Structure formats: structure tokens, C-alpha cells
Image: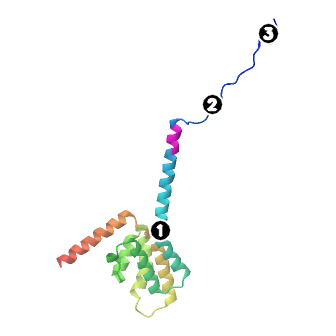
Amino acid sequence: MDPLAQLKAIQLPEQVHNYPLAYGWWILLTCLLLIIAWSLKKYLSYRRRCQAKKQAIKHIKENNLNSDQVLTTLKWAALQYFPRDQIASLTGDHLQQFLTSCLPIKQQEKFVDLISPILEQRYQCHEEKENNDALTQASLLWLTNALPPKKKVLEKQFSQQAINVKTAGDS
């Protein structure tokens, strides 16, 4: 009558597997993958949109450009984001007005102060180095703050273009 002799070996239950996971984990994993895919798409889209801006900034910073080359680079960058028929023919005051209207209100006054004297004296004899520095600063200010344009700016530009076409048609 030994109680220890009546004991039997302990049998462990089968190991519980982690798979299949509960539905909640699959839903969470799917949501995370969708968020990662969406974020990657947005990031690549942003990089693609900013590529022309970065090229223009790099071109202006790394090369010693004269005022005509800087203005050409500015127009090239603008042509990458705005319709060609709207930008290509702009010069002088019209170019300044267009570039100023693309900037946020906080930056407009500084940009106008930098670029106005340069555009006014463009075809006059003047100190090239002094004006070139101001134009480089103005162009870098415009490139960093105006590009890529926001949807509001694009809509505003298109509405102004439609008004200009309408008034030209009335004349």
C-alpha cells in the first residue's frame, strides 16, 4: 500500500502552436503593410516632384553664373512645375510678378527687394558681382520657398491666366 507506487508518469499536453494567428493579428499586419506602402509611395512622389528644384539649386550654388544664366535657371525650374505657355514669354515685371505670386506672403517682400533692382538694371552697365549675389540670393529664396507649388498656387495661377486670356480676347 505504498502511495508512491501508485503514481503514474506525468504526461504533458501537446505543444500549442503560434499558427494560425488570430484574425486581429492578420488585420494589424495588413494595415501596417498598407501604411508602409502608402508612405513609400508618397515619399517617392515627393522626391520625384522636388528633383527639378534640387537640380536648379545645385546648379546655382555650384556654378559661378551671371545674371542671365541665373534667370534662365529660374525659368527652367518654373517650366518644370507650371505650364509652358504661361511661363515661356514672361520677362521683366511680368516675370517678377509671376515669381512673387508663387511665394508665400511672408517671403514676397524680401524677394521683391532683392530682385527688383536687378530686373530694372538688367540691360544697363552695372556692377555684375554685386547684382549677381543679390540675384543668386533671390533665386535661392524663390526655389526653396515656391517649389514645388501647392495646389492653391496652381489654381491661383490658372485663374489669373484665364482672366488674362479673357481680357485679351475682349480687346
> Image check: 132 left or right of 84?
right
Query: Whole-percent x and y of residue 84?
Result: 34, 76
Location of mark 1 (residue): 50
Q: Name the mark nearer the viewer: 1 or 2.
A: 2
The disc, 1 or 2, on the residue closer to the chain's N-terminal end is 2
Q: Which residue is mark 2?
A: 16
Q: Is residue 93 above or below residue 150?
A: below
Query: CA separation, marks 1 and 2?
Result: 52 Å
Mark 1 vs mark 3: which is more N-terminal? 3
Residue visible at 41% across and 77% down in the picture: 112
The image quadrant that residue 152 belongs to is bottom left
Furthest residue toward top: 1
Q: Amino acid at mark 3?
A: Pro
SS class of the residue under badge 1?
A: helix
Residue 155 placement (x, y as % from top left): 32, 65
Q: Earlier in the sequence, mark 2 or mark 3?
A: 3
Q: Which residue is mark 3?
A: 3
Left/right placement of residue 116 relative to residue 27 reads left
Percent of width and height locating residue 165: 24, 74
Residue at x-position 62% and y-position 33%:
17
Region rendered in magenta = 24-29
Majority secondary structure in the magenta region: helix
Residue under the image location 43 percent in, 82 percent down = 72
Q: Nearer the viewer, residue 169 or 139?
A: 169
Looking at the rendered image, the quarter that the N terminus falls into is top right
Name the residue type under label 1: Cys
Q: Quadrant of the C terminus?
A: bottom left
Distance of label 2 from label 3 (alpha carbons) = 33 Å
